[in-house]
Amino acid sequence: MKIPFQGKEVEGKKIDFSTRKEDFNEYLLENGTILKMKLVVTQVIELVGEKNPDGGPAYFIKSTNVVAPLDLP
């Protein structure tokens, strides 16, 4: 599959993965609501022949945000 990367299209290879750990971040809003939020990865694509700034493999990540507001105290 072709992935746009730094102004060009590069070959991408889908990488299977399993979730090791997912935690929520919690934010206290001024109205007293606690907002819980986490990013969940849905797909990982390795960019074939590309490297990140540290020299390791470059990845394109698809993700979604999950938000869980808690009731007011």
Image: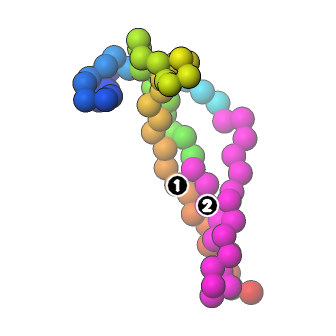
Q: Residue 45: x and y, percent?
A: 45, 25
Can residue 68 be seen from the camera position used here?
yes
Q: Residue furthest left?
A: 8
The magenta stretch is 19-39
Q: Residue 52: x and y, percent?
A: 49, 24
Classify residue 8 by image quadrant: top left
Contact (CB < 8 A) between labels 1 and 2? yes
What residue type is disc 1 on? Answer: Asn
Mark-to-mark CA distance, 1 and 2 = 7 Å
Give the class, few, some or many, for how many residues have Cα within 10 Å of label 2's Cα (few <14, many ≥20): some
Classify residue 5 by image quadrant: top left
Residue at the disc numbered 1 = 65
Residue drawn at x 64%, y 30% as measured from the top left: 18
Q: Residue 37: x and y, percent?
A: 61, 61
Image-based side of 15 in relation to 48, left or right: right
Q: Is residue 38 above or below residue 29?
A: above
Give the class, few, some or many, for how many residues have Cα within 10 Å of label 1's Cα (few <14, many ≥20): few
Q: Secondary structure at mark 2?
A: strand
Image-based side of 65 in relation to 2, left or right: right
Residue at the disc numbered 2 = 37
Q: Secondary structure at mark 1?
A: strand
What residue type is disc 2 on? Answer: Met
Residue drawn at x 45%, y 39% as measured from the top left: 62
Q: Is residue 16 above or below residue 64?
A: above
Question: Mark number for residue 40?
Answer: none
Number of numbered callouts drawn? 2
Q: Residue 49: x and y, percent?
A: 41, 11
